[in-house]
Every structure is written in structure tokens, then in C-alpha cells.
Image (cartoon, rainbow, N blue to C red):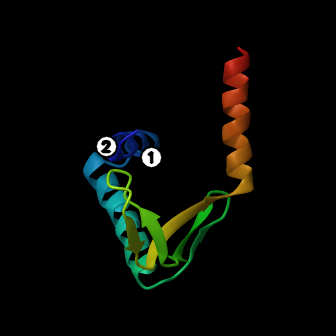
């Protein structure tokens, strides 16, 4: 599913125009980006939480040359899905497979 598909789905279920819906979706995504750039945690109950995690510096290996390479520490965004959402997805797919 692409962003355009999400916009279409939300627009048809809410009665908003696609232009209005796209503005809301873009606004949501930009708000999440900006909050994460500030290191803030975002919690969407029943969906999941976004947070920034620190990855420590480590030594990796270049598979082509087998040379050791140092990967510097970095901060990466992470989404942890809520247990309820995880169970919903699992149950729906298991049910689909059973039919």
C-alpha cells in the first residue's frame, strides 16, 4: 500500500477530498519526523510507539573484501507495534490462511 492508496482509502471513508486528506497525511508524517528529530517519543495507543534509539559504534566486515570497517554510532527511528495491533494482524492472517 502506498501513500496514495492510504489517501484514497481515508478520503473515501471520511468524505474529505483527496487534496484535504493528502494535506492531513503529509501533516501527520511531518509532525512525526520533526518530533523524532527532537528525540521525542510518539505514542499512538492501540497502534504503536515511535522512538529514537542509539546504535553503538561497531566493527563490521565488508563482504566483498572481508575488510573490517568501523560503523560509527548513530541514532535511528524505531516503531514498536502495540500488542493489540500485533494480535489483530496475526489473527486476521491466520484466519485468512485457514479459509
Q: Quadrant of the C terminus?
A: top right
Residue 49, image x and y in percent? 60, 67
| Rendered location of residue 13, percent (x, y) | 46, 41
Q: Is residue 21 depicted above or below 78 in this figure?
A: above
Q: Nearer the viewer, residue 27 or 78?
A: 78
Label 2 crowd bin: few (<14), some (14–19), many (20+), radius 10 Å: few
Label drawn at residue 52: none
In this view, 55 is above or below 65: below
Nearer the observer, disc 2 or disc 1? 2
31, above or below 92, in the image: below
Residue located at (34% from left, 53% from top): 21
Residue at 68 percent of width and 20 percent of height: 97
Q: Is residue 8 left or right of residue 76?
A: left
Q: Nearer the viewer, residue 46 or 54?
A: 54
Graded by Cα atoms within 10 Å as few (under 14), some (14 to 19) or many (20 or more), the crowding at tag 1 reads few
Distance in Å between CA atoms under marks 2 and 1: 15 Å
**Residue at left offset 68%, top offset 49%:** 85
In percent of width and height, residue 29 lies at 38, 64
Please give the name of the residue rendered at 66% of the width and 40% of the height, measured from the top-left corner.
89
Task: Specify the farthest residue to the top.
Answer: 99
In this view, the residue farthest toward the bottom is 38
Left or right: 70 as drawn, with respect to 4: right
Q: Residue 79 lies in what quarter of the image?
A: bottom right
Nearer to us in this view, 11 or 66? 66
Q: Which structural element holds mark 1? A: helix
Q: Is residue 47 left or right of residue 8?
A: right
Q: Earlier in the sequence, mark 2 or mark 1?
A: 2
- Element on which disc 2 rests: helix
Residue at numbered disc 2: 4
Which quadrant of the view contains residue 68? bottom left
Q: Position of residue 23 (x, y in %)?
A: 30, 60
The residue identified by callout 1 is 14
Amino acid at each position: 500500500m502506498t501513500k496514495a492508496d492510504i489517501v484514497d482509502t481515508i478520503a473515501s471513508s471520511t468524505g474529505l477530498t483527496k487534496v484535504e486528506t493528502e494535506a492531513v497525511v503529509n501533516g501527520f508524517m511531518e509532525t512525526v519526523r520533526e518530533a523524532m528529530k527532537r528525540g521525542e517519543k510518539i505514542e499512538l495507543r492501540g497502534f504503536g510507539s515511535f522512538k529514537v534509539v542509539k546504535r553503538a559504534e561497531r566493527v563490521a566486515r565488508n563482504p566483498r573484501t572481508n575488510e573490517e570497517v568501523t560503523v560509527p554510532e548513530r541514532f535511528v527511528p524505531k516503531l514498536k507495534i502495540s500488542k493489540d495491533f500485533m494480535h489483530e494482524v496475526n489473527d486476521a492472517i491466520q484466519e485468512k490462511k485457514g479459509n
